[in-house]
Image: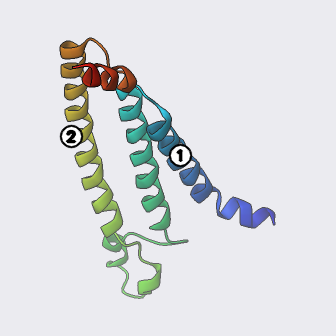
Amino acid sequence: MNTTLIEYLPYILCIAIICTGLYGTTNSSNYLKKLVSLSILQSGVILFFIAIAKVKDGQIPILACLDFKQCPEQLINPLPHVLMLTAIVVGVATLAVGLALIIRIKEEYGTIEENTLIEAEQND
């Protein structure tokens, strides 16, 4: 029982981070809090993909090529890491655009609360 829990601990932590980000995204009415929660959600997904890409006692392919006796099952696939690096870059760009939009909304309407903006839109 103990070894199984320790073995699955990275996955459990990733799911907890994802759930925290999802909760903040769905239950907050402040746009800045939603954006930060979305960033936390994205970080959890990236960590999850990195966690499932790990191979126990695996080696990176560039080092394993020096030793041709290495089994292909013991090589770590670099593709998930490269894809997550791309996801990080896209996430940072999305966060920057979202923050710029929040600043513009704050300048235009004086608030970043979703409920207040909906009420102001309905009154106009």
| Labels 1 and 2: the sequence-earlier one | 1
Q: Report x, y in % for residue 112.
A: 32, 20
- What's the CA distance linking mark 1 and mark 2? 21 Å
Q: Residue at x 44, y 67 (%)?
A: 53
Identified at 44% across, 40% down, the residue is: 40
Q: Nearer the viewer, residue 59 or 6?
A: 6
Q: Which residue is mark 1?
A: 17
Q: Is residue 113 above or below residue 9?
A: above
Residue kind at label 2, given as amino acid type: Ala
Q: How many marks?
A: 2
Residue 94: tell me if it is visible. Answer: yes
Percent x, y for residue 21? 48, 42
Question: In percent of the image, x 43 and y 54: which residue is there?
Answer: 45
Q: Compared with residue 119, is residue 96 higher up or lower down, i.e. above or below? A: below
Image disc number at residue 93: 2
At 39% from the left and 47% from the top, the residue drawn is: 42
Amino acid type of disc 1?
Ile
Task: Name the image quarter holding residue 35.
Answer: top left
Q: Position of residue 64 (x, y in %)?
A: 37, 76
- Which is nearer the eye, 69 or 113? 113
